[in-house]
């Protein structure tokens, strides 16, 4: 344990993210990413401080090498976790019109599998023109469906 208090906060934030609901997953991702950034910054400060000092003693040199390795491993793990969480956040918040249509069809939104993207919006081919939704509405619905899908997969 390099920074016990921060590591404890990280565990709690990760646990909360793993138990997130579609209503709060975006906020929990952002909170977790902020803690990961704080921890990573602390690790870099540690790596750039006393760990780099040279010593004539073999046992102290071995201890410093082990400490450097521990910090390097923690930085790599934190970076990997940050990248994973950033990709999750991006996947549940960034949806194109084409991706929205694909998601609506895959999820059989409103019982339809024939949603299509048009210049004027998104609609099911079997519905009338007054049932047309804006592209932004379709993107918002698809984003919510993605969050729900992630949460269902995560809880399984």
Image (cartoon, rainbow, N blue to C red):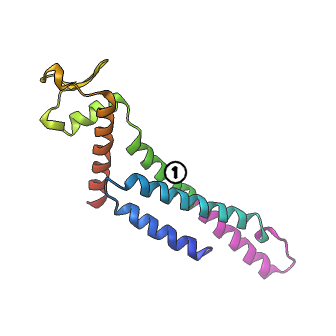
Is residue 128 shown above or below 105? above
Front-lying residue, 2 or 56: 2
Residue at (38, 31) in percent of width and height: 96
Please state the extent of the stretch shown in magenta in the rendering. Answer: 51-76
Q: Is residue 54 magenta?
A: yes
- Position of 50 with respect to 130 (left or right) is right
Image position, residue 35 (x, y; %): 54, 62
- Position of 111 with respect to 43 (left or right) is left
Image position, residue 99 (x, y; %): 33, 32
Front-lying residue, 25 or 154: 25
* Count of marks placed on residues: 1
Residue at (59, 58) in percent of width and height: 37
Residue at (29, 27) in percent of width and height: 134
Image position, residue 44 (x, y; %): 69, 61
The quarter of the picture where the N terminus appears is bottom right
Is residue 134 shown above or below 109? above
Residue at (22, 37) in percent of width and height: 106
Image position, residue 114 (x, y; %): 18, 27
Q: Is residue 144 magenta?
A: no
- Position of 138 with respect to 92 (left or right) is left
Front-lying residue, 119 or 86: 119
The quarter of the picture where the C terminus appears is bottom left
State the SS at label 1.
helix
Residue situated furthest right in the rendering: 56
Residue situated furthest front in the rendering: 130
Quadrant housing residue 55: bottom right
Is residue 43 shown above or below 148? below
Callout 1: few (<14), some (14-19), or many (20+) C-alpha neighbours within 10 Å?
A: few
Residue assigned mark 1: 83
């Amino acid at each position: 344990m390099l920074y016990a208090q921060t590591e404890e906060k990280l565990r709690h934030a990760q646990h909360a993210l793993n138990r997130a609901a579609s209503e709060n997953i975006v906020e929990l991702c952002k909170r977790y990413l902020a803690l990961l950034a704080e921890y990573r910054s602390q690790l870099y400060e540690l790596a750039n401080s006393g760990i780099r000092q040279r010593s004539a003693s073999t046992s102290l040199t071995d201890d410093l090498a082990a400490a450097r390795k521990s910090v390097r491993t923690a930085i790599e793990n934190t970076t990997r976790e940050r990248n994973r969480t950033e990709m999750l956040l991006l996947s549940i918040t960034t949806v194109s019109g084409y991706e929205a249509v694909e998601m609506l069809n895959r999820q059989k939104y409103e019982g339809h599998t024939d949603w299509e993207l048009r210049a004027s919006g998104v609609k099911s081919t079997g519905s009338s023109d007054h049932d047309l939704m804006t592209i932004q509405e379709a993107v918002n619905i698809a984003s919510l469906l993605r969050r729900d899908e992630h949460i269902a997969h995560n809880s399984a």
